C-alpha cells in the first residue's frame, strides 16, 4: 500500500516537475554553460572557459558599467525594503485594527496599482514627472518646488523610479502582512492587554516576532524581484539607464550586453550576458538561503 501511494504521488507531481525542469532548471543550467562561451549561435561560438567572468571584472569598460549597475540595483532594493515594506507593515496594522472603517475600500485602493501593467504605469509616471506636462498644474497649486526634471537629474532619477515601483507593488506586502496579522491568535493580544501593554509594545513584542516568517518571505521576494527588475527602468528612462547610466540596473545591463548589444559596437554578446546572469544568480543564492534559514526555522 505504501509503495502504491508513493507511485500515486509521483504521477501527480510529474507535470509540475516536468514544467519546472523544462522552463526553469534547464534554462538556468544552459545559461551557466553559455557563460563559458563567446560569440553567438549565428556567427559561431567559441569555448573560452572563465574568460567572460575575468573580463567582466578586469576590463575597464565592463567593470565601470557592472559596478554602476550593481550599485544602483542595491540602492533600488534598499529603497524598496525601507519604503515599500515598512509602509506595507504600517498600512497592514491600520487595516487590521478593529476600529478601522471602510477597510475593504482602502485595501482595494492600495492593491489597485498592482493590477496595472508596468509599462503603462511607467509611461504614465514619466509624463507626470515631466515638468513640461505637469508644470502648469503644479504651479496653479502653488507647488513650484515640485516642478523639476525628476528623471533628467542624476541625483533624483533613481529615487524617482524606485518610488514609482514602490507605489505600484506595495499592495502585495500589505496583503501578505494583513493575512499574517489576522492569523495571530487574539489570546496573545488579550493577555498583553491584561498585563497593561500598549499598542506599540504589543506590536514590537508580540505581533512582529510572530510574523517573522512572513516578513522574511516578503524580504526574499523583494530581493529577488528587484535584482531581476527591468521593465520599470525601460518604461521610465531607457535601456541605457538615463541620465548617464544613473538608473542603470543589472536587468538593463544584461539586456544591452546579452540581447541588444552594448554601445558603440552594437553586437550582442550572449556569453557575457550569461556571465552577468550567473553572477546575479549566485548573489541571489547568497542572500536568499541565509534569509530562509533565519526566518523560516531552517537548521
Image (cartoon, helix red, strand yellow):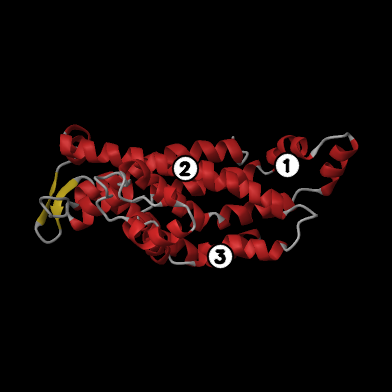
- Look at the image and tell me whether residue 53 can be seen: no
Q: Are marks 1 and 3 in contact (CB under 8 Å)?
A: no
For the view shown, which residue lies furthest in the right direction? 194
Q: Residue at x 67, y 51 (%)?
A: 92
Q: Earlier in the sequence, mark 1 or mark 3?
A: 3
In this rendering, the count of numbered labels is 3
Q: CA distance from mark 1 to mark 3?
A: 26 Å
**Disc 3 element:** helix
Q: Earlier in the sequence, mark 2 or mark 1?
A: 2
Q: Is residue 294 above or below residue 122?
A: above
Along the horizontal axis of the image, is 130 left or right of 261? right
Q: Are marks 3 and 2 in contact (CB under 8 Å)?
A: no
Looking at this view, is 18 or 172 the one in front?
172
Position in image of residue 154 (x %, y %) = 31, 43
Q: Earlier in the sequence, mark 3 or mark 2?
A: 2
Q: CA distance from mark 3 to mark 2?
A: 21 Å
Q: Residues within 10 Å of mark 1 (few under 14, many from 20)?
A: some
Position in image of residue 156 (x %, y %) = 37, 44
Q: Residue at x 55, y 67 (%)?
A: 12
Which residue bears the numbered disc 3?
112
- Residue 207 marker: 1
Looking at this view, is 294 or 236 the one in front?
236
Q: Are marks 2 and 1 in contact (CB under 8 Å)?
A: no
Position in image of residue 274 (x %, y %) = 26, 49
Looking at this view, is 244 or 31 the one in front?
244
Q: CA distance from mark 2 to mark 1?
A: 24 Å
Q: Residues within 10 Å of mark 2 (few under 14, many from 20)?
A: some
Position in image of residue 227 (x %, y %) = 39, 47
**Disc 1 element:** helix
Which residue bears the numbered disc 2?
79
Amino acid at each position: 500500500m505504501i509503495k502504491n501511494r508513493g507511485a500515486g504521488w509521483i504521477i501527480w507531481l510529474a507535470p509540475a516537475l516536468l514544467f519546472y525542469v523544462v522552463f526553469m532548471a534547464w534554462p538556468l543550467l544552459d545559461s551557466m554553460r553559455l557563460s563559458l562561451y563567446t560569440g553567438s549561435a549565428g556567427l559561431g561560438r567559441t569555448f573560452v572557459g572563465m574568460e567572460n567572468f575575468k573580463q567582466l571584472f578586469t576590463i575597464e569598460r565592463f567593470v565601470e558599467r557592472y559596478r554602476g549597475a550593481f550599485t544602483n540595483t542595491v540602492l533600488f532594493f534598499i529603497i524598496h525594503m525601507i519604503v515599500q515594506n515598512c509602509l506595507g507593515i504600517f498600512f497592514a496594522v491600520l487595516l487590521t485594527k478593529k476600529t478601522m472603517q471602510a477597510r475593504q475600500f482602502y485595501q482595494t485602493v492600495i492593491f489597485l496599482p498592482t493590477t496595472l501593467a508596468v509599462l503603462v504605469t511607467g509611461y504614465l509616471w514619466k509624463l507626470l514627472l515631466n515638468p513640461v506636462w505637469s508644470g502648469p498644474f503644479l504651479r496653479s497649486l502653488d507647488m513650484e518646488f515640485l516642478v523639476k526634471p525628476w528623471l533628467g537629474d542624476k541625483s533624483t532619477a533613481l529615487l524617482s523610479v524606485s518610488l514609482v515601483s514602490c507605489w505600484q507593488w506595495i499592495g502585495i506586502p500589505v496583503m501578505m502582512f494583513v493575512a499574517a496579522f489576522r492569523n495571530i491568535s487574539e489570546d496573545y493580544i488579550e493577555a498583553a492587554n491584561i498585563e497593561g501593554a500598549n499598542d506599540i509594545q504589543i506590536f514590537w513584542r508580540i505581533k512582529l516576532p510572530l510574523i517573522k516568517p512572513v516578513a522574511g518571505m516578503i524580504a526574499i521576494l523583494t530581493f529577488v524581484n528587484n535584482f531581476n527588475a527591468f521593465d520599470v527602468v525601460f518604461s521610465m528612462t531607457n535601456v541605457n539607464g538615463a541620465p548617464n547610466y544613473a538608473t542603470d540596473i543589472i536587468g538593463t545591463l544584461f539586456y544591452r550586453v546579452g540581447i541588444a548589444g552594448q554601445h558603440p559596437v552594437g553586437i550582442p554578446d550572449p556569453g557575457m550576458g550569461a556571465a552577468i546572469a550567473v553572477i546575479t544568480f549566485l548573489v541571489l543564492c547568497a542572500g536568499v538561503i541565509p534569509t530562509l534559514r533565519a526566518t523560516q526555522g531552517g537548521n
